[in-house]
Image (cartoon, rainbow, N blue to C red):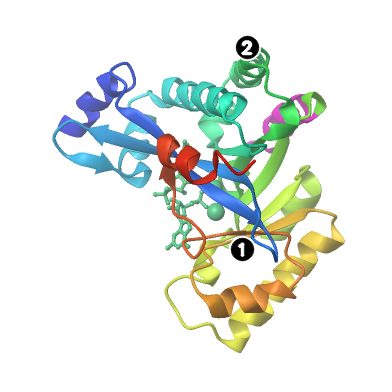
Amino acid sequence: RELRSDLQTAAQDGQLELYYQPILRNPDATPTGVEALLRWNHPTRGLVPPDRFLPLAEASGLMPEIGKWVVQKAIKDAAEWPMAFGVSINVNSSQLLHPEFAQDVENALAAHGLPAEKLTVEITESQILDRIEDTQTVQQTLNNLGVRFALDDFGTGYSSLSYLHLFEFHSLKIDKSFLVGHNFTDNTKGLLTTMINIGQVLSMSVVVEGVETDAQRAFLRHSGCDFLQGFLFARPLPLSDLLTAYGQSD
Ligand code: G
Ligand code: G
Ligand code: MN
Ligand code: NA
């Protein structure tokens, strides 16, 4: 209703913002990149999370425009910041399958001079269920440029494993639900070990998301996972805070 019509002007009025959450190498926790996470600074409601407004954007046909803004802003920021950080963006199927998506990405990389290898596109299993061939085609086009793909929220989809040989993923992001919101049991550890092994066997970089405790970090140290992401290390940060925290060190 009201929120939906507000969204129309949000992009033009500069109300959308990208937050960046560091992704760190395991085990030394050196930050090597960030994930871009969309936020809406609503003039009266404050910060609206993407889970609230992305479904509205989708329903009202605003997703292509918002998605294009995300692509351009993330690539611009990554080209300009002084750190050697790559950037990951989240993309849903309507964005990925939009006829201009690959060209928009290529244009933005060229316009800002960001090497394609610095960009990772995160897609979830549920987002590639419907149109496998079309998705493969876009992925191929972008892979050829050097852009990387990550399978996001791994472990939560219907048939996780079939995607691993149908698509070319550079990295596997193990969903935070394996760590967040419950005890860190032997079963959880077994599941994590198994999923990490799948990524290793298939020569993918494995990222474990949702690392919140020292016990989890200690377990992951010898697990074979390549990268860590979670509140234990850093929350999603506005660009200015990211630069303050990491901009001097590199
Ligand atoms: O940042 P947070 O945990 O609130 O994000 C909630 C969900 O919104 C996550 O699943 C994340 O992937 C998704 N999301 C965040 N930013 C974007 C974006 O720019 N585009 C799309 N399509 N999804 C996003
Ligand atoms: O679906 P996707 O993996 O893109 O969603 C990423 C979301 O996970 C972000 O919105 C971010 O805020 C959230 N997130 C990142 N690290 C943690 C964490 O350690 N704990 C919790 N609860 N959420 C996290
Ligand atoms: Mn993600
Ligand atoms: Na995820």
Please give the name of the residue rendered at 49% of the width and 65% of the height, measured from the top-left corner.
232
Bin the neighbour count of mark 1 within 10 Å (Cα to Cα): few under 14, some 14-19, many 20 and up.
many
Disc 2 is placed on an element classified as helix
- Looking at the picture, how far across and down is residue 60, in whole percent? 32, 26
Please give the name of the residue rendered at 53% of the width and 29% of the height, measured from the top-left corner.
74
- Viewer-proximal residue among 24 and 196: 24
> Can residue 21 be seen in this snapshot?
yes
Task: Check the image and report above or below for 85 versus 206.
Answer: above
Q: Mark 2 belongs to which amino acid?
A: Ala
Is 31 colored magenta in this rendering? Answer: no
Q: Is residue 158 left or right of residue 1?
A: right
Magenta residues, start to end: 131-143
What's the mark number on residue 22? none
Bin the neighbour count of mark 2 within 10 Å (Cα to Cα): few under 14, some 14-19, many 20 and up.
few
Is 135 colored magenta in this rendering? Answer: yes
In this rendering, which labeled residue sits more in front, label 1 or label 2? 2
Q: Which residue is mark 2?
A: 111
Task: Check the image and report above or below for 150 versus 131.
Answer: below
Disc 1 is placed on an element classified as loop
